[in-house]
Amino acid sequence: MAYTKGDIHIGNIIHEQLRKDQRSVGWLAREIPCTRNHLYKVFHRPSLDTDLLLRISQVMNFNFFQYYVAEIKKGESQRMGE
């Protein structure tokens, strides 16, 4: 999935990856730890605190920061071409 500036909705991306991994919301809530209700709120957030994103990345063994790095690189490439 490709994202452009403003398209990164990290909550949706986490929820999508959780489904791809065939893991339950309850599983992630226990691993973080937090409540399931809190996680459902996280899924609706376009951005997250980096500490929470790091915990989720570690537990799910998936680098969610990669989407932001791609944005940074894209911006750098655009500046170089100007």
Image (spheres, rainbow, N blue to C red):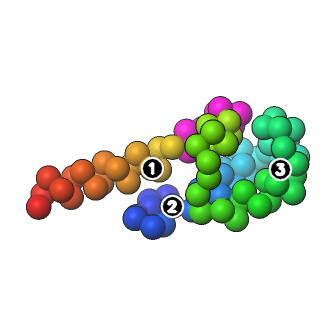
Identify the residue position indicated by label 2 in the image. Answer: 8
Mark 2 lies on a secondary structure that is: loop
Q: Count neighbours of disc 1 (C-alpha within 10 A) and say few if under 14, some if 14 to 19, many if 20 or more.
A: some
* Callout 1 touching callout 3 (CB < 8 Å): no
- Inter-mark Cα distance, 2 to 1: 8 Å
Count of numbered badges drawn on the protein: 3
Q: Quadrant of residue 2?
A: bottom left
Tag 3: amino acid: Val
- Inter-mark Cα distance, 1 to 3: 24 Å
Give the residues in magenta.
57-64
- Residue 82: x and y, percent? 11, 61
Residue 79 belongs to magenta span:
no
* Callout 2 touching callout 1 (CB < 8 Å): yes
- Residue 72: x and y, percent? 34, 50
60 displayed left or right of 50? right
Q: Residue at x 62, y 43 (%)?
A: 53
Mark 3 lies on a secondary structure that is: helix
Q: Quadrant of residue 29?
A: top right
Tell me which label, 1 or 3, sits earlier in the chain: 3
Q: Which mark is residue 68?
A: 1
- Residue 55 vs residue 12, the one in the foreground: 55
- Residue 66: x and y, percent? 47, 44
Tag 1: amino acid: Tyr
Identify the residue position indicated by label 3 in the image. Answer: 25
Is any atom of residue 12 visible in this view? no
Tag 2: amino acid: Ile
39 displayed left or right of 1? right
Position of residue 38 relative to residue 62, above or below, is below
Q: Count neighbours of disc 3 (C-alpha within 10 A) and say few if under 14, some if 14 to 19, many if 20 or more.
A: some
Q: Residue at x 84, y 44 (%)?
A: 34
